[in-house]
Amino acid sequence: MGFDELRSAVRGRVLVPGDADFGRAAQPWNVAVDQQVACVVEAEDAEDAAAVVRFARAEGRTVVTQPTGHGATGGIDSAILLRTGLLNTVRVDAHERRAFVGAGANWGQVQAAAAVHGLTGLAGSNPVVGVTGYTLGGGLGWFGRKHGWASNAVRAFEIVDADGRAARVTAESDADLFWALCGGGGDFAVVTALEIDLFPAPGLYGGRVTWTASRLAEVWEVFRELTSDAPDELSVWFQRFQFPNAPEMVGLDVAYLGDPEQGRKLVAAIDRIGAPISDSRGAMSVAQLGDITSEPTDPSPSISRAELLTDLDDDTVKVLLGESVTPLLNIQVRQLGGALARSASGARGALRAPYVVYLLGLGLPQLRDAVNAKVSAVVDGLAGHIAAGKPYTFLAPGETVAAAFDAATVERLREIKSARDPHAVLRANFPVLDS
Ligand SMILES: Cc1cc2nc3c(=O)[nH]c(=O)nc-3n(C[C@H](O)[C@H](O)[C@H](O)COP(=O)(O)OP(=O)(O)OC[C@H]3O[C@@H](n4cnc5c(N)ncnc54)[C@H](O)[C@@H]3O)c2cc1C
């Protein structure tokens, strides 16, 4: 069988090298990742996804599912890339506070549909990130300290299994698979839709304040103060930025899920710092949460690395603040804790470390070596303050699931993978058997 047979088996487009749109369709969001796949299928419906899996099984090929390629890691030469972006139906049942979310929908779509009913999903910091990839990896955003992982809110997965059969998976119908999909990644099935809990949309106070780097020490002190004693409704993220051809900046991002006036009072310590370059804090709607960080959403080459931190003692401070950000673009420290430390449903489990540091640089050929060297230097410097079990969605190319889970969880994920996909037809961005 060749790809012509696949063309006649699906309704969506099948693109192979040489087709006009192949390059664009095969390219992941992180353009620093090389993705030389054999074919791209743009599924039009769940039956297309099932037909692709059956074809791959018969042909001894691998199916890699990616709505966007935000989490692409490479190493998938000769695979079939299944694009799920067209499966983007979002339906809200306001009475049951549930959303039915197609596998290709992003958080912006879900939040817009939920907002009509005064509801919210447990979205991440950016509206363009896909709900499915984010949730399969646990999903950690502004709602984490109050409600825990986004994967805690899943009630059901609609899937296609490794034999190409459709099924609805709940905690009751298939406890092992449900557990694995709740935070263990996309290695176990192709998800065609999710059913997730929605929550009453809270009042909201949030925004970003930035200063010149001369305020670094003061900003850090306020970050430590605010995060040492915050209610679960408040999250504060510390940021250092070095944008090309611009002076270095330092910033604080805040989100308070509650009465805006109360939120303003809770972060009043920020006003002690004075002379900000910008201050976007104010009352906002849940749909505007992505404006707080306004991360770039166009495809770009990036190198990133995240590490959980056990504390912010003076040694940690020396590493995080002691030298300039360059050649990185961003050093971010997110406050964790709250419900994240308490919630333990699914493979993701509880996250007890109080902070996560995230390093980001450009993966351009002329910068790559310097960025990697800086990342290594920071991580080495933080040794002794790094906790195991980092968020799966923060794993970077080159890492494995062993960096995201404890040994017992990795072992159980491997067992489930071997039982559910013995011919390795499906491949996630971080395959559990490669760890
Ligand atoms: C701008 C930006 C902001 C971000 N902010 C956050 C944040 O606040 N919190 C956070 O936790 N993460 C965040 N992330 C990381 C993001 O959650 C991960 O990169 C996630 O994997 C993206 O999912 P995706 O579907 O968009 O990406 P893709 O690369 O398309 O998919 C990622 C992986 O998910 C799996 N997958 C996706 N769809 C399916 C499916 N239908 N069936 C089976 N497996 C599937 C596959 O294994 C795939 O390799 C951010 C990423 C970006 C680019």
Image (cartoon, helix red, strand yellow):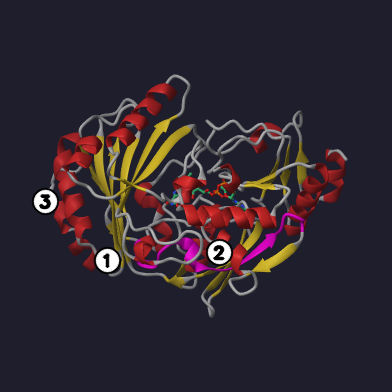
The residue sitting at the bottom extreme is 95
Q: Is residue 337 above or below residue 35?
A: below
Q: CA distance from mark 3 to mark 2?
A: 46 Å
x and y, in percent, of residue 360 in the image: 39, 36
Q: CA distance from mark 1 to mark 3?
A: 19 Å
Q: Which residue is mark 3?
A: 272
The answer to which of marks 2 and 1 sits earlier in the sequence is 2
Residue type at numbered disc 1: Pro
Q: Residues within 10 Å of mark 2 (few under 14, many from 20)?
A: many
Q: Is residue 325 above or below residue 100?
A: above
Q: Quadrant of the C terminus?
A: top right
Res. 132 visible in picture: no
Q: Secondary structure at mark 1?
A: helix
Q: Which residue is mark 1?
A: 260
- For the point 23% across and 41% down, the residue is 316
Magenta segment range?
145-164
Q: CA distance from mark 2 to mark 1?
A: 37 Å
The answer to which of marks 3 and 2 sits earlier in the sequence is 2
x and y, in percent, of residue 253 in the image: 29, 50
Residue type at numbered disc 3: Arg
**Location of residue 262 by image quarter:** bottom left
- For the point 38% across and 27% down, the residue is 371
Image mark for residue 179? 2
**Location of residue 268 by image quarter:** bottom left
Q: Secondary structure at mark 3?
A: helix
| Residue 149 placement, left or right of 259 | right
Image mark for residue 335? none
